[in-house]
Amino acid sequence: MKTDKNIAQYLVNKLEKEGVEYIFGYPGEQVLPIYEALRNSKIKHVLVRHEQAAAHAADCYARITGKYGVCIATAGPGAMNLVMGVATAYKDNVPLIVITGDVEKADRNSDCFQEMDINGVFKPITVKSYYSCTPEKLENNIEEVFNYKKSGINGPFHINIPKDVQNKPMNIHHRTITKKKIGDVIESSILDTIKDIDDSIKPLIIVGSGVIYGGCIDELKTFVEKTQIPLTTTFTSRGIISEYDDINLGLTGTRGTKEANYAAGHADLILALGCRLSDRTLKHVATKNIIQINTNVEHNRAGKFYNYNIKEFLEKMNEKDLPQKDDKWLHRIKSQGEYPPNEIDKTDNLHPEEVINTILSKENRNITFIFDAGQSPTYFTTNSKAEKHGQLLFSGGFGPMGFALPASIGASFATDDVIIACPGDGSIQMTIEELATIHTYKLPVIIIVLDNNLLGIIKQWQDMQELPNYQVKLDNPDFIGLAKAYGIDAEEITSIEQLSMKLEEAIEKRKAKLFHVMIEDVHIPMPNH
């Protein structure tokens, strides 16, 4: 029998029973009953300084753990401030539970203070947006959200609850109805896939983050060990198998490794597991012989598409006597070598690639790297190797500026790693208030501000199109002074040697630190490989 006094308490108790440990949020009038329930819960609330940061923090927590990240905001402006972060998660199918309060039911459609069609806004950027206007609906909605996750369907889910409903008593006689969202794996699909593997000479696996969120990394590793099929990944699944392992060719697509892109261009069979096969991922794929397993039918871009739970599919495959491929194909791929390193010219300020290479030289440690939109992701992507999944994090398909700083907050609650966040001078100013959150919770986040006084990537596009530079110059603040105002130790970096030494010290201390690095205005390489 349900014993929760009201719906707000039921919701919080349900989240706690499902294993939610953290909620990232910002309180407001229309979510006060939920906050009162949280006050007496084991769930820890992380008070950010802007609602966008709550969504980005929850997103990054989910990217690392594979669990639901949860964020909360009040009605009207609070809910609207979540939109950027929710859209970012939606683009990459990151599992989020987004909770918003709303005006009372009687005030709906009355144009009252802070009223907004919240569900109308969230509908196109979530798997589902619920208006939980009765206790029974709320219970069915939250049950369905967790049922989706168990079925392998991931992405943001939005639950919008009027304030008066949050205080309503729980209906102890109401029974929820649950049903499986994805069909069972059919035996013929397994046998057909095994035959296709057996018939292939140059098979390749492309893995997406659906394998992480589906909780089947071990099943993937078993499948790869049994078949010895080379593997490549999308960005969001980098390190799912160590990139130091020969079987993992690294990132595929627009910024992919030479080995991965050679394999994509010459494979005669591709198994796309838990990935959406975006335009960037498919850039070098030549064969039409693609088998895709995904729970999202909107991502159907293959010759054969199976709408299955990826975990169940891999479990069924691993039960069979799978064909093992010989190593000639892998040797042929590995013989291609790597792309030559970029030439680094000496400049007045530090070269951005040299700075980033120094940061990445610490990668074989318990460190998670988070970078922002702009020029730096190309260097971080092409010059790095991931030992484990979640070690290199980027905002992915949506690419908003301002991601790195709040994402580092979520990462700090998801892993025991030291977090190194690398925003540009433009990006950090979009969410710089989150330095306060990092200070408040004493998070081990090292922030390295890469400062060229520019919106560098926009200037580069203007240069490439032979347009005069316009509105790309930044008159930046004193980042050292700002960090110290927020209670975070900060230093100016003027040499590579100093950066290496100071970064090592900061990693050892595991305390928040900001480094300001002036870098040269240099065009990033725009590889067409």
Image (tube, rainbow, N blue to C red):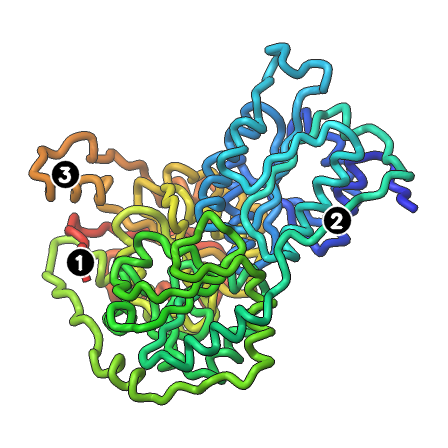
Q: Is residue 389 left or right of residue 357?
A: right
Q: Is residue 292 visible?
A: yes
Residue annotated with mark 2? 178
Secondary structure of the residue carrying tag 1 is: loop
Circle 3 residues within 10 Å: few <14, some 14–19, many ≥20: some
Foreground residue among 488 and 233: 233
Residue annotated with mark 3? 462
Residue 253 versus residue 427 in the image, above or below = below
Q: Residue at x 76, y 31 (%)?
A: 33
Secondary structure of the residue carrying tag 3 is: helix
Numbered tag placed on residue 528 in the rendering: 1
Circle 2 residues within 10 Å: few <14, some 14–19, many ≥20: few
Numbered tag placed on residue 32 in the rendering: none
Foreground residue among 124 and 472: 124
Q: Residue at x 56, y 30 (%)?
A: 79
Q: Is residue 453 visible?
A: no
Front tag of 1 and 2: 2
Residue 370 versus residue 51 in the image, above or below = below
From mark 1 to mark 2, how far is it between C-alphas?
Answer: 48 Å
From mark 3 to mark 1, how far is it between C-alphas?
Answer: 19 Å
Q: Earlier in the sequence, mark 1 or mark 2?
A: 2
Residue 474 versus residue 277 in the image, above or below = above
Secondary structure of the residue carrying tag 2 is: loop
Q: Earlier in the sequence, mark 3 or mark 1?
A: 3
Quarter the C terminus occupies: bottom left
Q: Amino acid at mark 1?
A: Asn
Q: Amino acid at mark 3?
A: Gln
Circle 1 residues within 10 Å: few <14, some 14–19, many ≥20: few
Q: Earlier in the sequence, mark 3 or mark 2?
A: 2
Task: Give the x, y percent position of residue 148.
Answer: 64, 51
Q: Residue at x 66, y 46 (%)?
A: 145
Task: Give the x, y percent position of residue 82.
Answer: 52, 35
